[in-house]
Image (spheres, rainbow, N blue to C red):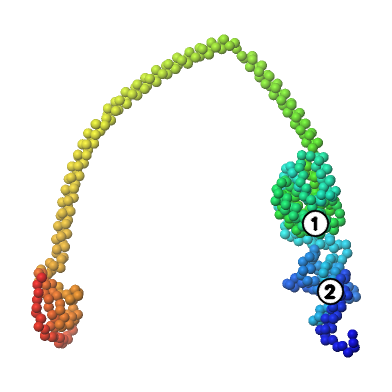
């Protein structure tokens, strides 16, 4: 670089950033978190410090989502990052790719945080635990080559060989184990060939057993329709799967013993039942022998028994004949009563009575019709007389007339027509057709007004009358 080259501030920061990111592309740094900020974007910003210095750090959302624990202020952590420069301010910073608690308690902290979070959702509650059914077929989700499957098969063969075993081969350690375990649980529920499932493996470190501490495995166990027994590690080992499962077995062998009844004990129970059955059969046989003896003692000679049966048959025959005679007499008396009743209820007699009733009703009906007709005629005459007295034509007969305009309206006031207008007057007999010559209006009562000068007009048709 020549001495006379001059950088702008942006160029200098850009060049420094490139140098830092190339020289320190992957570093591991340990320190204490302070000034932790989690904005809504999902990115984290904090300061990593020790007793002598500090450095700014940024961890973007794509990386924070992969963490198995939730860091907080004051936590000592180990970072895997690259060194960079924030060009706008010229601040030296770390871009964090991964984070874990510093020291041996990293996985324990992640385990405890996940356990507390799932417990808050109620995932470990007893109300979700399914009872263990009667076992005829068991599904085992484990490694097909591990010691755990060998131990479980040995226990099942020794204690109860009748139980059928379905093995769902699955890796139980490593990065891909979680997805395989979840898929095996879902496949077993779809197949519906087994009564329950055992999920397990042999002992190991917390890191070896970590796939059974994954949240995906916990929810797969919770959603399983088949009851699940968790048998992971040794007796002192506990995983998240143990808390979610319906039953926890301390070891895989203990799970097999829990689900398989002891065959020798069953054989002893069968022997006891067989002995009780034999004793019961002997008692029944003795009782039946004693009953047969009593029956034989009461058994009489066949000839005497036949005589008794013949005498009894004769008595029954006599009783039957008497009963038949009594029945015939009762039926004869009943027939006589029915014949007498039939004479009284003969149809011709009833018909004559009904004809007499009909003739009497016809006379009554004719009389009532005549009375009602007379009443209606009298009422009609009275109504006609009343109507005639109220008829306008009757009023016309007393010398009055009805005057109408040409459109048929009846004249009630003189000022509604004008001289020269034609009007019609109806008399008692005939009509008059006239032309108005003059109009005269009378003053109201109590008023003295000069008579209004009549309006007049000569018309050659005045006084012309017509008759109907």
- Which residue is at 24% across, 34% downward? 351
Q: Of tags 2 and 1, which is closer to the observer?
A: 1
Circle 1 residue: 177
Q: Residue furthest front?
A: 2
Please determine whether, in this image, residue 71 is positioned above or below residue 215: below
Q: Position of residue 385 (x, y in %)?
A: 14, 61
Element at badge 2? strand
How packed is label 1: few (under 14 Cα within 10 Å), some, or many (20 or more)? some
Q: Position of residue 316 (x, y in %)?
A: 47, 16
Could you tell me which quadrant the N terminus lies in? bottom right
Q: Nearer the viewer, residue 36 or 146?
A: 146
Q: Is residue 293 visible?
A: yes
Element at badge 1? helix
Please determine whether, in this image, residue 147 is positioned above or below residue 448: above
- Which residue is at 83% across, 67% downward? 99
Please determine whether, in this image, residue 295 is positioned above or below residue 468: above
Q: How many marks?
A: 2
Mark linked to residue 94: 2
Q: Nearer the viewer, residue 118 or 185?
A: 185
Q: Position of residue 125 (x, y in %)?
A: 73, 54
Q: Nearer the viewer, residue 148 or 308?
A: 148
Q: Is residue 91 left or right of residue 133?
A: right
């Amino acid at each position: 670089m020549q001495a006379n080259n001059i950088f702008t501030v942006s160029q200098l920061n850009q060049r420094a950033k490139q140098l830092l990111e190339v020289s320190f592309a992957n570093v591991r740094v340990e320190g204490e978190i302070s000034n932790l900020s989690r904005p809504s974007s999902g990115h984290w910003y904090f300061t990593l410090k020790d007793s002598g210095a500090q450095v700014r750090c940024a961890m973007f959302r794509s990386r924070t989502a992969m963490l198995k624990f939730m860091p907080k202020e004051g936590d000592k952590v180990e970072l895997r990052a690259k060194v960079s420069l924030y060009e706008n301010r010229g601040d030296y910073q770390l871009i964090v790719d991964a984070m874990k608690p510093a020291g041996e308690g990293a996985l324990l902290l992640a385990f405890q945080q996940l356990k507390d979070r799932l417990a808050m959702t109620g995932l470990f509650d007893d109300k979700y635990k399914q009872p263990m059914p009667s076992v005829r077929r068991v599904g085992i989700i484990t490694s097909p080559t591990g010691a755990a499957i060998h131990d479980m098969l040995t226990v099942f063969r020794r204690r109860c060989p009748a139980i059928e075993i379905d093995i769902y081969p699955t890796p139980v350690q490593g990065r891909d184990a979680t997805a395989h375990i979840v898929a095996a649980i879902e496949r077993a529920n779809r197949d519906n060939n087994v009564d329950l499932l055992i999920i397990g493996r042999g002992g190991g470190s917390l890191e070896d057993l970590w796939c059974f501490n994954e949240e995906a495995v916990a929810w797969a166990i919770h959603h399983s329709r088949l009851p699940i027994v968790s048998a992971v590690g040794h007796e002192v080992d506990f995983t998240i799967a143990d808390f979610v499962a319906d039953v926890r077995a301390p070891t895989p062998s203990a799970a097999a013993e829990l689900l398989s009844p002891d065959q020798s004990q069953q054989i002893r129970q069968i022997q006891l039942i067989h002995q009780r059955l034999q004793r019961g059969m002997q008692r029944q046989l003795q009782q039946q022998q004693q009953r047969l003896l009593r029956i034989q003692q009461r058994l009489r000679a066949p000839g005497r028994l036949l005589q008794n049966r013949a005498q009894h048959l004769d008595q029954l025959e006599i009783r039957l004949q008497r009963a038949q005679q009594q029945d015939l007499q009762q039926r004869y008396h009943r027939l006589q009563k029915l014949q007498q009743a039939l004479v009284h209820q003969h149809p011709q007699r009833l018909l004559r009575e009904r004809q007499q009733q009909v003739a009497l009703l016809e006379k009554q009906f004719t009389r009532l019709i005549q009375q009602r007709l007379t009443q209606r005629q009298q009422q009609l005459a009275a109504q006609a007389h009343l109507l005639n007295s109220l008829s306008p034509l009757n009023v016309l007969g007393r010398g009055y007339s009805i005057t109408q305009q040409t459109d048929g309206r009846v004249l009630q006031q003189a000022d509604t027509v004008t001289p020269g207008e034609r009007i019609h007057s109806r008399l008692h007999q005939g009509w008059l057709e006239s032309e108005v010559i003059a109009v005269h209006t009378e003053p109201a009562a109590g008023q003295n007004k000069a008579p209004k000068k009549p309006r007049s007009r000569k018309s050659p048709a005045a006084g012309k009358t017509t008759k109907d």
